[in-house]
Structures are given as structure tokens and as C-alpha cells.
Amino acid sequence: MELRHLRYFVTIAEEQNFRRAAERLHVSQSPLSRQMKDLEEELDVELFEPAGRGIRLTAAGKVFAERARAVLAGVASAVEETRDVARGRQGTVTIGFEQGATFTGALASLMAAFRRRAPRVGLELVAMTGSEQWAALRDGTIAFACGSHRPSDAALSWLEMTSDRLGLLVAGDHPLAARDEVRLRDLEGERVVLEPRELDPRLRAAIVAAFQAQGAHPGAITEIADLEALLALVAIGDGVTFTARRTAALVTPVTSMVWRPLGDLDVELADVVAWRARDEDLPVVRMLVECAREVRPLLRTDGPA
């Protein structure tokens, strides 16, 4: 028994006439009748009985017609689902995101645009550091990444979504919190807490170079891998850190910390999306890249003043 036998049978059941069914199926009536006879022999039941100038279904035929329609509907659904998966419109996509760096609008805007295009695709979001994202992209654990660090791996492609000048984040009762603008020399002797160097070597190099250019010497630079722990230390006055204004706008309203511009630190922190270069032609990755390019101009014009 083949799917065409079921299609032929259902069409005959709907038309209740072999000639009309043959015309609708664009086949000859004689082979159609013969195939239905073969189907009855295979099932060992009679599916049709004479009715005037046409035919009608027997009791067994009615039951088989219901099941045949269900099978054909299931096959059609499977075909459509398979095509949707191939087009990137169904299935599940895993996206890595960097805590603290993607809550500034880039990730939310990207996901909203993607949801409009692919409402049936499941989204799995996994919190990762920048270096974990690059490793996960390389081994295919995730399909897309969103964070604050640009990958240096040639196997990865990336797009800058936003950029914002770095400023200083300090506890509300820190002496520097009372100033409208801070200079790097004001950080003499201060403990500076930063994320690990390997997350963005270029960013760390730019910060160190800025200190050297101004002849400024912080008391110590301490690396803290956990962002929440880093912010907690700053909040209790056990260090200061650099962050973009967009990120600071999320934490300062619910903490005692304040953000102050640094007049002599011309360094920007970016929101970046990345993907494996060889995956760019995959439908779901291509759609995510298109969504990123769609929302990017809005993000770059809607930042805080």
C-alpha cells in the first residue's frame, strides 16, 4: 500500500464516482478501478458498493476513509514542518548571552524581531561569558551569541549592535560620586575591579594605555569573573569599575551606585552579536543576522542622551 492509494481512495470516497474521481486525479478510470480492487484485496474487505450510477462506501470503507484522511493530513503536516525547519521557521535555536551586557536592549530587540519572523521557532537562551560563547560557537553548541566582547577568532563573524563610551561606576558614598566628571588621575590608589582580560584583550589594553597616557596609577587591578560579585564589591565601596552608560542605567536605579563620565578615557564598550562564519547560509542563522541588521539602526539612535 502506498500513499497514492490512500489519495486515490479518499478522492473516490469524496466523489462517489470512479469517472469523476479519475478526472479529478488526472488518471485513467480503468487503472484507478484496478488499483482500488488491489487495495480491497490487500485489506481483504469491500470498500465500495454500488449506489445508483455511482458508488458509496461500505461500513468498512467509511472507517478506512477516516483513517486514510488522518494519515494524509499527518503526512502533509510532516512535509510542511520539515520545510519550515529547512527554512529556519520551526525547531529550536540556542543563543548564548552575556549577563549584564545584553540587558541593554540589544538582545531583547533582536529576540522580538526574530519572534515576528519565526513565531514557531523555540528559543533557548544560555548565560555564558564571552570566551564560553566563542567556544560554544566553534563546537556548534550554540548557533548565535550576544555579548559585549568582539571575538578575535577568524572562524567567527560578528556585528556591532551598539557602542557606548565607558565611564566610572562607584558606590554612592564614594568621594568620586560627588563629582560631575572624573579624570583617570582621580583613581590614584583606587582598587579597580574588571572582568578577566581574556574576555576582551583589546578593551583591557585600551584601558591600560589610557592610564599610561595620563600618567595615572590605580592602586590595583583585580579580575572578577562573576559579574554579580564584581558589582557587589563596587556597591560596598570595595573598588571601582568601568562600564558603559547603558549598562549602568540598569543597575544604578536599584543600587546605591552611581555612574560618572571619565573626561580622559575615550574607550567604548560594544554590544556584539556573533555566529560561526560557515553557518551564515543556514536559514535560522541567516534570519538572526538579518534581524540583527534590522534592529541595529534603532539601537544606535535610541540610546540614552
Image: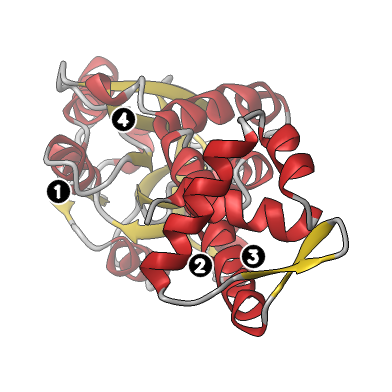
The spot of residue 85 in percent (x, y) is: 44, 43
On residue 275, the disc is: 4
The spot of residue 105 in percent (x, y) is: 60, 45
Residue denoted by label 3:
253
* Mark before the other along the chain sequence, 3 or 2: 2
Which quadrant would the N terminus be assigned to in this image? bottom left
- Amino acid type at mark 1: Ala
Quadrant position of residue 187:
top left
Residue at the image position 51 percent from the left and 67 percent from the top? 173
Q: Is residue 273 above or below residue 45?
A: above
Camera sees residue 174:
no
Using the image as rendered, state which of residue 208 and residue 130 is in the foreground.
130
Q: Nearer the viewer, mark 4 or mark 2?
A: 4
- Amino acid type at mark 4: Trp
Q: Are marks 4 and 3 in contact (CB under 8 Å)?
A: no
* Disc 2 residue crowd, few under 14, some 14–19, many 20+, Cα 10 Å: some
Q: Are marks 3 and 2 in contact (CB under 8 Å)?
A: no
Q: Secondary structure at mark 2?
A: loop
* Mark before the other along the chain sequence, 1 or 3: 1
Using the image as rendered, state which of residue 26 and residue 104 is in the foreground.
26
Q: Secondary structure at mark 4?
A: strand
Q: Nearer the viewer, mark 1 or mark 3?
A: 3
Quadrant position of residue 246:
top right
Q: Secondary structure at mark 1?
A: strand
Residue denoted by label 2:
173
Q: Is residue 269 above or below residue 252?
A: above
Residue denoted by label 1:
220
